Image (tube, rainbow, N blue to C red):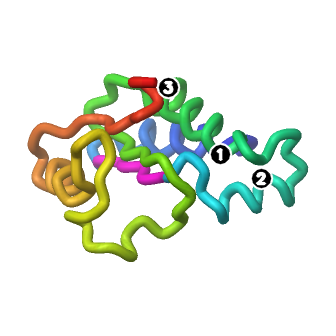
Amino acid sequence: MDHFGDLVRFNTLHFPHIRFGLIQSYEDRVMTYFAKSLGSSDASTAVRKSMIEASNHYLGLNNPHAKVFFLNGKNHVITKKPLREVSSENVTLLEWLQGMFENSTWHNVRPDLRQ
């Protein structure tokens, strides 16, 4: 595997019956540090670009079993706060996870699509 998207694609192709959720902050401090350490030409945007590319090209915007919950910000550990207090695009992380685990309506939460 050469790219984060390869891992995502492997999981969605080999386990299509299992719901997959990606929760990530666009400017995650820890992931940005790794991008810089690995020689990214622009570590400040590498995480955001990788997230968007994985979502658009490896998960697919309409994949019924794989969704993303993206947030603006730099937090690495999103779940340090109560899940009902973490929100993006007027959806709480609690609501999003309930949709994932209850096999009910479940959507991508992507502020980058609204900008």
Residue on which the image places disc 1: 47
| Disc on the earlier residue, 3 or 1 | 1
Is the C-beta separation of discs 3 and 2 under 8 Å? Answer: no
Q: Nearer the viewer, mark 3 or mark 2?
A: 2
| SS under mark 2 | helix
* Highlighted magenta segment, given as a residue range: 19-24
Vertical placement of residue 10 versus 30, above or below: above
The three-letter code of the residue at mark 3 reads Asn
Vertical placement of residue 4 versus 82, above or below: above
Q: Residue at x 85, y 45 (%)?
A: 40
Principal secondary structure, stretch drawn in magenta: strand
Instruction: Name the quadrant containing residue 86.
Output: bottom left
Q: Residue at x 90, y 50 (%)?
A: 39
Residue 93 image point, x, y percent: 27, 56
Q: Does 17 sit left or right of 20 as displayed?
A: left
Q: Nearer the viewer, mark 3 or mark 1?
A: 1
The three-letter code of the residue at mark 2 reads Ala
Q: Residue at x 39, y 35 (%)?
A: 110
| Disc on the earlier residue, 3 or 2 | 2
Judging depth in this view, the residue of 54 and 86 nearest the camera is: 86
The three-letter code of the residue at mark 1 reads Val
Residue on which the image places disc 3: 56
| Disc on the earlier residue, 1 or 2 | 2
Residue on which the image places disc 2: 35
Measure the C-alpha gap from mark 1 to mark 2: 7 Å
Judging depth in this view, the residue of 75 and 52 nearest the camera is: 75
| SS under mark 1 | helix
Q: Does 52 sit left or right of 42 as displayed?
A: left
Is the C-beta separation of discs 1 and 2 under 8 Å? Answer: yes
